[in-house]
Image: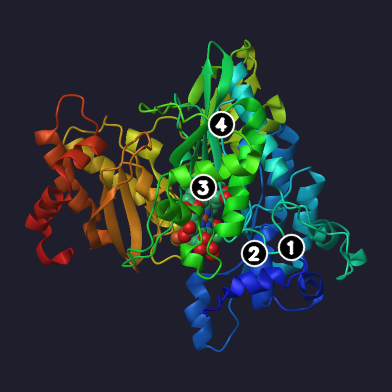
């Protein structure tokens, strides 16, 4: 008889007394770090222990301790904040973090570089703003994403309501969070009041993501979520929801049993059944997801192995309801919301471009100060987007020029190329413990080089989405855009093309390994092919998909010979 050996994290979760572990005790000691079990549990509380990767090797050689610090991730459903929350978060970042606020690809904020001695103060201060970090990470439903543009119509308002409702319903309910971070001194390990009606004491087998949008605007890359919801509407009325399951991008190089996957449609449900359908899918993952191997534990593996009709039948059996098949959706679009737009009630919203989502001041460009001045003076609503940008809403017509002047004074970028506009980069080095190569830190240089190459070939106005990550986990969704550049080893990347701009098709690997120095040269060969052989109005991603990877590989090989694999 075979016995199931649970993964180490499973044991840590189930022995944690609903996420308490020894976090409270270890918070009080003088170490600059937590022990291994607590590091895992801290994720559920919204924080990751990290260390400065730039200095670690040198410090080790000298027999010194790494420079430990904490990344704190908030949970901001739909990315929606009020102006006061923004200002308070900005203050907190100046006081306790590396002073930047970083907009993530799931439209929330991260703080980097918080020291252990400031961790409790930072998290409890965040909770005073009526924002939480609970369930921002860990094996639970994480930040729920939707369209950021604050459009005031029935459909967009419904999307925001739904994102908030889903996030609230699936936030962990154990009282550990409140006891550790807010009333820590009163904490008792054996508190029996805690429970998790949906998750149970071992929570989910793996992280779980939900996104909701409309087919007319897939700016949230919804199909990369474990549950992808399309709100279906007609004449300003919600008809119901198309539910797709199993999106997820993480994979490991050279392990074909791990793969990126787009969510597959399973059913259509009406408004009154959305909650119950989501809950049943989560329970299926809770009960059937793989708890022995974390590399095989995402919902996508269950979907790939069991098939979509298994899911539908299971949900129907559990709910005692019969669901229609999903509505056919075959023409996804993405709307560019940056710049000024009328929001639907006479007021305006402004989408501001933030490279890599990093809100900070540097020598020339004062993004942090500029945003603060605008938000302080005009008190707009503030919304973070899944492409790492920021939106300010509820602006009066008369204030637009004044806001423009503040943007100009702080040199906040207004004119950008198409490549810059759609380029995403994950944080990678020096904070991310999993990074194999650089991403955010080479972003601007790479964009510059690619722009020059496109200009040379008269392609600068082409809309091409490029995403770079420091490793194959896919945090900037590299396999879902036109071009994916994926960290392979230090200074080397795998290159992916042939996905589509609209996020309905994944890309394929063209090169397994190319140096950073040769990357743009390789891309140039594909741009040359595109220029010569594209069909009329064919997009870059569709072109690469049509000609296939062999031709692209051959063309790159002609120029770069043995320096590519
Ligand atoms: Fe991610 C792990 C950053 C969105 C897939 N991700 C990490 C960690 C926490 C590294 C770690 O485990 O030690 C990174 C922290 C780096 C740092 O210094 O901040 C990290 N992920 C990010 C962010 C900040 C990237 C960004 O550029 O903004 C995004 C935070 C989102 C949020 O607010 O919740 C972020 N991560 C994503 C996405 C995109 C998405 O969700 O739309 C993905 C791909 C979709 C998916 O989930 O499959 C993603 N992150 C991963 C994975 C691979 C998961 C898998 O199934 O294999 C890992 C590694 C893991 O979980 O083992 C990971
Ligand atoms: Fe880190 Fe990899 Fe995610 Fe980039 S893609 S943040 S390197 S885990």
Q: Residues within 10 Å of mark 1 (few under 14, many from 20)?
A: many
How many numbered tags mark residues here? 4
Labels 1 and 3: the sequence-earlier one: 1
Which element type, helix, strand or loop, lies under badge 3? loop
Q: Residues within 10 Å of mark 2 (few under 14, many from 20)?
A: many
Residue 224: x and y, percent? 45, 45
- CA separation, marks 1 and 3? 30 Å
Could you say which is closer to the camera, residue 66 or residue 170?
Answer: 170
Could you say which is closer to the camera, residue 117 or residue 273?
Answer: 273
CB under 8 Å between callouts 1 and 3?
Answer: no
Q: Is mark 3 within 8 Å of ligand 1?
A: yes
- CA separation, marks 4 and 2? 27 Å
Name the residue beneath numbered marker 3: 226
Residue 119's disc number: 1
CB under 8 Å between callouts 1 and 4?
Answer: no
Which element type, helix, strand or loop, lies under badge 4? loop
The residue drawn where x is 45% and y is 32% is: 218
Residue 40 placement: quadrant: bottom right
Labels 3 and 4: the sequence-earlier one: 4
Name the residue beneath numbered marker 2: 70
**Which of pointers 2 and 3 indicates the residue nearer the eye?**
3
- CA separation, marks 2 and 3? 27 Å
Considering only vertical position in the picture, is 32 above or below 100? below
Name the residue beneath numbered marker 4: 148
**Which of pointers 1 and 3 indicates the residue nearer the eye?**
3
Residue 145: x and y, percent? 57, 39
Residue 340: x and y, percent? 51, 20
Labels 1 and 2: the sequence-earlier one: 2
Q: Residues within 10 Å of mark 3 (few under 14, many from 20)?
A: many
């Amino acid at each position: 008889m075979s016995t199931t050996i649970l993964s180490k994290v499973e044991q840590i979760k189930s022995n944690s007394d609903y996420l308490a572990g020894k976090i409270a005790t270890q918070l009080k000691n003088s170490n600059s770090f937590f022990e291994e079990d607590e590091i895992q549990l801290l994720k559920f509380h919204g924080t990751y222990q990290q260390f400065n990767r730039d200095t670690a090797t040198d410090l080790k050689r000298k027999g010194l301790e790494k420079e430990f610090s904490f990344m704190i991730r908030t949970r901001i459903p739909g990315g929606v904040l009020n102006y006061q929350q923004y200002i308070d978060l900005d203050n907190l970042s100046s006081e306790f973090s590396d002073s930047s606020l970083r907009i993530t690809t799931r439209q929330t904020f991260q703080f980097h570089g918080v020291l252990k001695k400031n961790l409790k103060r930072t998290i409890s201060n965040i909770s005073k703003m009526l924002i939480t970090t609970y369930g921002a990470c860990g094996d639970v439903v994480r930040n729920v994403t939707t369209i950021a543009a604050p459009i005031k119509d029935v459909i967009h308002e419904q999307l925001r309501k739904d994102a908030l409702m889903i996030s609230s319903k699936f936030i962990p309910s154990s009282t550990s969070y409140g006891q550790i971070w807010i009333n820590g001194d009163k904490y008792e390990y054996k508190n029996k009041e805690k429970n998790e009606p949906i998750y149970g004491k071992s929570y989910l087998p793996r992280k779980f993501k939900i996104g909701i949008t409309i087919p007319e605007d897939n700016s949230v890359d919804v199909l990369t979520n474990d549950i992808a919801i399309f709100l279906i509407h007609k004449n300003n009325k919600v008809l119901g929801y198309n539910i797709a399951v199993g999106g997820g991008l993480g994979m490991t190089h050279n392990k074909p049993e791990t793969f990126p996957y787009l969510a597959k449609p399973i059913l259509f449900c009406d408004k009154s059944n959305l909650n119950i359908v989501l809950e049943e899918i989560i329970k299926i993952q809770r009960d059937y997801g793989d708890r022995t191997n974390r590399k095989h534990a995402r919902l996508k593996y269950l979907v790939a192995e069991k098939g979509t009709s298994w899911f539908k039948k299971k949900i129907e059996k559990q709910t005692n309801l019969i669901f229609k098949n999903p509505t056919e959706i075959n023409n996804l679009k993405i709307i560019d919301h940056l710049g000024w737009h009328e929001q639907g009630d006479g007021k305006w919203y402004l989408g501001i471009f933030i490279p890599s989502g990093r809100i900070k001041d540097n020598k020339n460009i004062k993004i942090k100060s500029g945003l603060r001045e605008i938000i302080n003076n005009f008190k707009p609503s503030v919304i973070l987007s899944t492409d790492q940008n920021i939106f300010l809403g509820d602006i009066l017509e008369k204030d637009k020029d004044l806001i423009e002047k503040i943007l100009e004074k702080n040199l906040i970028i207004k004119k950008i190329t198409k490549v810059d506009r759609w380029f995403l980069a994950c944080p990678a080095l020096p904070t991310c413990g999993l990074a194999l190569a650089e991403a955010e830190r080479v972003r601007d240089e790479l964009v510059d080089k690619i722009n020059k190459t496109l200009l040379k070939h008269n392609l600068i106005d082409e809309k091409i989405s490029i995403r770079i990550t420091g490793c194959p986990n896919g945090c900037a969704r590299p396999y879902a855009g036109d071009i994916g550049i994926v960290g392979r080893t230090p200074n080397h990347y795998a290159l992916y093309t042939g996905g589509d701009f609209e996020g309905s098709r994944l890309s394929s690997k063209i090169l397994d390994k190319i140096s950073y120095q040769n990357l743009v040269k390789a891309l140039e060969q594909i741009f040359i092919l595109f220029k010569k052989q594209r069909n009329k109005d064919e997009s870059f991603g569709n072109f690469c998909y049509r000609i296939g990877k062999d031709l692209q590989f051959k063309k790159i090989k002609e120029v770069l010979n043995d320096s590519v694999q």
